[in-house]
Image (cartoon, rainbow, N blue to C red):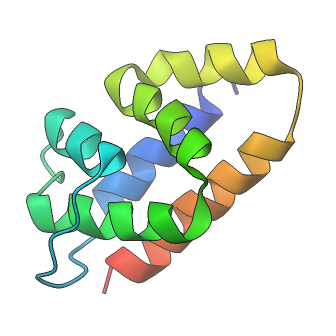
Amino acid sequence: MRYIPAVIAMVALVALGSCGGRRVTGDISRACVASGRDAASPALCSCVQQVANQTLSASDQRRAVSFFENPEKAQESRVADGTAAFWTRYRAFTEAARAQCSR
């Protein structure tokens, strides 16, 4: 249970396919590519960035970038912040990314 947010992010990356050839640059996309995960292709990471642009504020995106860099930080953050609002938005983002990018 401790690593649920990190696991959601990892599962989203592994389960995702490609969202087409469009390249979108952004903090999430760069963090995704830099994560070193096998599934983290430029096309996939661009798709994830597109979904982030549609579902997360700039502030939420900056926060989520740190989870790509250090998945354990997600759990620490979830426990420390005491609010569910960000995690509700973050889960919606991961679900939308999985649905849109796995085509």
**Residue 72: x and y, percent?**
50, 17
Q: Is residue 68 left or right of residue 52?
A: left
Task: Give residue 16's quadrant in the image.
Answer: bottom left
Looking at the picture, does residue 29 appear above or below residue 72? below
For image coordinates 53% across by 17% down, the residue present is 73
Task: Say if residue 16 shows up in the picture.
Answer: no
Task: Say if residue 32 shows up in the picture.
Answer: yes
Task: Give residue 80's quadrant in the image.
Answer: top right
Extreme front residue here?
58
**Residue 89: x and y, percent?**
71, 54
Q: Quick one: 57 or 83, which is closer to the camera?
A: 57
Locate the C terminus and report the quarter of the image it occupies: bottom left
Q: Is residue 82 left or right of residue 20?
A: right
For image coordinates 25% across by 80% down, the residue present is 19
**Residue 43: x and y, percent?**
14, 68
Looking at the picture, does residue 77 appear above or below residue 56? above
For image coordinates 64% across by 50% down, the residue present is 90
Task: Give residue 45's quadrant in the image.
Answer: bottom left
Locate the N terminus and report the quarter of the image it occupies: top right
Q: Is residue 62 left or right of residue 57?
A: left
**Residue 12: x and y, percent?**
42, 56
